[in-house]
């Protein structure tokens, strides 16, 4: 009698049919607002965007919008100019592919932190979101990649959403100008410097205005970064705080007080002299910039290489062009004072890895002839000031070099391979640790400090050709927050467990400004004294410790490696 069923009964049976229930299940588990019938779409101030789907480690489908222009391409007449607003577009902009990085030397293709391809047209960002229509709106994590202000990538295969978007946050990763194109300064209004930081500021303004269209909460933006990306975070916490573009910061292994991320007024002139000699450009700033605009990018990179700080002993890509204080008449100036004279008032999560210096000293480790140690031993009075960047900040660089040798290596020591880890510690403290401690003391907000001692199955020094694995080096923590796809990348079960815990803590800070998730066995307390209490992130536990590297930091407190800056802000 099936034919005689009323339409109502047939309707009821359909509601309970297996087909409907399976469709319902499918629908309930799709990302909200997608329907997943096609690619994700959203609209921003410039027009409509078409993105693509990504699947996270926890099997969640999230939307990615790759390579969105946040400024006009800085090419032609806009080379060496502050970032200009992006243009509008007709129809849908296809935000489905990673864009090239900003011009840089690619280095070996093994290293996941550098761009495989680069182009001067590079001011793009990528947004990853669980739901473009999220209600309530989601907190946002903006990540600024590191790379000594000379290299860097925003590629989704390196800094993608695979781990972080198992949590309810939005991730934004961006490119900004690097090297000579991003940080050349003539200490003159025509080219005052800091263009790479100004690009980041332009991106932060864009994010603040448009993130609602991705389901993000513009009042809950945290800026984060690693190495020079962390230094950039500090620069924004200090100098762009008044714009209200973010509410908190996360800084991995870097600060604006690291000696290699700042150049004092007046110390730029030798570099500009050399630049004029190589290029044969006119000396007058206006004509010099016009002349530099005529060079192809490849030649500018060659020029940058020939101006490099090269000391044969500690061979690491130390930035030639660095952030500077801008002259007082520059309207869009970003850095207006020595960062050491400043304080901030923000929730801050920051810290360092166990032996940061392993990455910077990898050439020593690899050189089995020990020539590098011999050279260092014979010339440390020249090598240390230059490689630890106090050659233009200390009144008596050689005396400081003696004090450093005495403290870390032994006064009369013959410096050899037995001193390798002491040397790595010295570099760690100079480049990373001491600056982080001083910046923690200068924060009136809550600082949550960490020391990363979890040794995973990946370490960046292996990608640089070293077989050794002494401890957790610079950049190694990134393997737990990002996919970091690279040849030979291992993922063990304990790495995955640890990575999920780290993601939980970091995203808890992004959501609630507190890195201790509810019901977690760890209680990460904020710093309460100048000795800097910290969370020791160990191989199988988390322990609050009393004073971060106390003896070493006490030594740096007394080291006269940085005399007070004589020059004030440059005048026009």
Image (cartoon, helix red, strand yellow):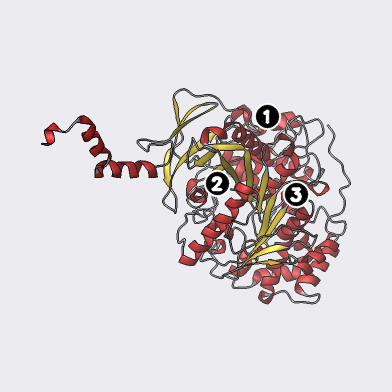
Q: Position of residue 354 (x, y in %)?
A: 65, 66
The residue tagged 2 is 153
Q: CA distance from mark 2 to mark 1?
A: 28 Å
The residue tagged 1 is 290
Q: Earlier in the sequence, mark 2 or mark 1?
A: 2
Query: Dot 2 lies on which element?
Result: loop
306, above or below 282, in the image? below
Q: Position of residue 306 (x, y in %)?
A: 66, 48
Residue 35, located in which quarter of the rendered image? top left
Q: CA distance from mark 1 to mark 3?
A: 44 Å
Q: Position of residue 440 (x, y in %)?
A: 75, 54
Q: Earlier in the sequence, mark 1 or mark 3?
A: 1
The residue tagged 3 is 445
Mark 1 Cα-neighbour bin, 10 Å: few <14, some 14–19, many ≥20: some
- Tell me if I can see residue 323 in this picture: no
| Front one among 186 and 463 | 463
Identify the residue at horizontal 19%, vertical 31% (top origin). Answer: 6
């Amino acid at each position: 009698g099936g034919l005689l069923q009323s339409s109502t009964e047939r309707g009821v049976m359909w509601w309970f049919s297996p087909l409907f229930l399976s469709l319902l299940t499918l629908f309930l588990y799709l990302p909200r607002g997608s329907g997943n019938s096609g690619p994700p779409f959203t609209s921003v101030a410039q027009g409509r965007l078409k993105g693509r789907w990504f699947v996270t480690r926890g099997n969640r489908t999230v939307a990615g919008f790759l390579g969105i222009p946040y400024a006009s391409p800085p090419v032609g007449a806009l080379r060496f100019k502050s970032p200009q607003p992006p243009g509008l577009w007709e129809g849908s902009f296809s935000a489905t592919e990673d864009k090239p990085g900003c011009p840089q030397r690619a280095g070996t293709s093994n290293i996941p932190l550098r761009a495989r391809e680069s182009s001067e047209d590079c001011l793009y960002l990528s947004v990853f979101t669980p739901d473009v229509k999220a209600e309530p709106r989601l907190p946002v994590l903006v990540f600024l990649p590191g790379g000594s202000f000379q290299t860097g990538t925003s590629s989704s295969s390196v800094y993608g959403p695979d781990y972080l978007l198992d949590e309810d946050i939005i991730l934004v990763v961006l490119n900004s100008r690097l090297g000579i194109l991003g940080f050349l300064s003539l200490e003159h209004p025509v080219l005052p410097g800091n263009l790479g930081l100004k690009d980041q500021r332009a991106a932060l303004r864009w994010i603040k205005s448009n993130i609602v269209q991705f389901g993000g909460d513009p009042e809950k933006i945290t800026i984060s970064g690693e190495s020079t990306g962390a230094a950039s975070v500090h620069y924004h916490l200090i100098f762009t705080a008044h714009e209200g573009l973010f509410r908190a910061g996360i800084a991995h292994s870097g600060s604006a007080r690291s000696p290699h991320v700042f150049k004092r007024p007046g110390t730029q002139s030798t570099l500009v002299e050399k630049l004029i000699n190589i290029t044969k450009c006119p000396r007058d700033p206006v004509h010099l910039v016009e002349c530099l605009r005529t060079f192809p990018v490849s030649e500018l990179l060659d020029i940058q290489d020939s101006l490099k700080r090269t000391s044969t002993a500690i061979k690491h890509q130390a930035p030639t062009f660095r952030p500077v204080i801008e002259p007082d008449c520059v309207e869009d100036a970003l850095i207006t004072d020595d960062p050491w004279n400043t304080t901030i008032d923000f929730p801050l999560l920051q810290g360092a890895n166990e032996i940061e210096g392993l990455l910077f000293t990898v050439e020593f480790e690899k050189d089995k002839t020990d020539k590098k140690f011999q050279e260092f031993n014979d010339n440390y009075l020249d090598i240390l000031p230059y490689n630890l960047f106090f050659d233009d900040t200390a009144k008596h660089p050689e005396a400081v070099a003696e004090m450093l040798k005495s403290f870390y290596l032994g006064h009369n020591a013959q410096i050899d391979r037995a001193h390798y880890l002491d040397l790595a510690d010295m570099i760690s403290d100079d480049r990373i640790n001491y600056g982080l401690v001083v910046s923690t003391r200068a924060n009136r907000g809550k600082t949550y400090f960490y020391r990363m001692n979890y040794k995973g199955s990946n370490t960046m020094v292996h990608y640089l050709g070293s077989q050794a694995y002494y401890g957790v080096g610079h950049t190694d923590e990134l393997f737990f927050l990002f996919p970091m796809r690279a040849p030979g990348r291992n993922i063990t079960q304990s790495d995955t467990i640890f990575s999920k815990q780290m993601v939980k803590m970091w995203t808890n800070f992004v959501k609630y400004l507190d890195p201790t998730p509810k019901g977690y066995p760890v209680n990460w307390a904020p710093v309460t004294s100048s000795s800097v209490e910290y969370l020791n992130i160990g191989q199988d536990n988390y322990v609050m410790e009393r004073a971060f590297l106390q003896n070493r930091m006490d030594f740096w407190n007394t080291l006269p490696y940085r005399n007070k800056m004589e020059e004030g802000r440059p005048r026009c």
